[in-house]
Each structure stands twice: as C-alpha cells, then as structure tokens.
Image (cartoon, rainbow, N blue to C red):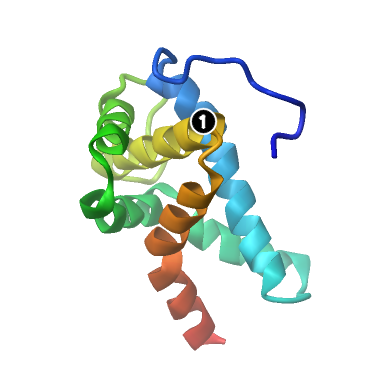
C-alpha cells in the first residue's frame, strides 16, 4: 500500500540517488515499525535502538548479508546505488560503509517503488536480524 496513491515512476530510469532518497525513509520506517512491535518503551530508548540499525555501519553489514541472496536485477540496483557519486560525505563513517549504505537504500527505494513489499520485508529482516538479536541480549 502506498500512502499517497500510485507513484508513477519508471524505477529503472530513476537515478540511484533518487532511489536512495526514498529508500532511506523506507529503511527507517521499517526499523521504527519493528521497534514499536517489540512493545511500548520510552521514546529515547526506541530512538537509541533505531540509531544502532539506521546508520552506515549497520547498513554496510546488512549489505554483506543480503548481497548473496539477491536476484541479478536487485544486485544491479544495489551496485548502482553503491557506485553513485554523491555530493554529501560520510559523517563519522568510512567511505566504504557510506557507499554500501547508499546501495542498500537505493535497493530498498527501488523495491518500494515497484511495490515489492514482501521482498522488501524479507531482505530487511535478513539484513537486520543479527542487530536485533544483539540488542535483545543487552536488555
């Protein structure tokens, strides 16, 4: 379900940075949804959990985890995002992690715009499962 109707975009012709622009929000929304599904908690604790999942280092780890299971088409989008030249720079993150995070965001944006919600959720869970498990062990 898209919030404001159909987005009429040829997803294969969009810039990888445009895909990453929407994918960043999709990734954050999925993260917040999963954190809320864990139960009611103080907002500052939920925000801290989200920061451990939505950052270039964690997304770079997710990149490594999901890359082997991607279709050829998904892999192409991931690489386009990773290789995109951005005018922004990594803040407190390595360039490699930042680029790989952009690849993940581009892939998530592409899947969202194509309406591939089940695949989106499958890849999100696969890529973040380890992070969620570590977070639960700390509590």
Q: Position of residue 84 (x, y in %)?
A: 31, 22
Left or right placement of residue 87 versus residue 71 in this view: right
Residue at 61% x, 15% y: name it: 8
Based on the displayed image, in which of its 4 quarters is residue 37 positioned? Answer: bottom right
Q: Residues within 10 Å of mark 1 (few under 14, many from 20)?
A: some
Left or right placement of residue 32 versus residue 128 in this view: right
Quarter of the image that includes the C terminus: bottom right
- Of residue 21 and residue 94, the one placed in the foreground of this image is 21
Residue at 38% x, 41% y: name it: 104
**Vertical comparison of 51 with 20: above or below:** below
Q: Position of residue 47 (x, y in %)?
A: 66, 61
Q: Secondary structure at mark 1?
A: helix
Question: In the rendered image, which residue does mark 1 sit on?
Answer: 114
Left or right placement of residue 128 versus residue 24 in this view: left
Based on the displayed image, in which of its 4 quarters is residue 42 positioned? Answer: bottom right
- Of residue 99 and residue 103, the one placed in the foreground of this image is 103
**Vertical comparison of 115 with 6: above or below:** below
- Of residue 33 and residue 87, the one placed in the foreground of this image is 33
Residue at 33% x, 29% y: name it: 81
Q: Position of residue 138 (x, y in %)?
A: 50, 85
């Amino acid at each position: 379900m898209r919030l404001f109707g159909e987005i009429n975009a040829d997803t294969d012709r969009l810039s990888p940075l445009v895909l990453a622009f929407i994918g960043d929000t999709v990734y954050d929304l999925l993260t917040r949804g999963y954190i809320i599904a864990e139960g009611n908690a103080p907002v500052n604790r939920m925000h801290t959990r989200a920061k451990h999942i939505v950052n270039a280092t964690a997304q770079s780890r997710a990149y490594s985890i999901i890359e082997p299971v991607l279709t050829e088409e998904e892999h192409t989008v991931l690489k386009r995002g990773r290789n995109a030249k951005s005018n922004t720079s990594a803040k407190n993150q390595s360039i490699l992690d930042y680029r790989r995070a952009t690849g993940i965001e581009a892939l998530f944006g592409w899947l969202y715009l194509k309406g591939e919600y089940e695949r989106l959720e499958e890849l999100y869970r696969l890529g973040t499962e380890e992070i969620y498990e570590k977070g639960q062990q700390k509590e």
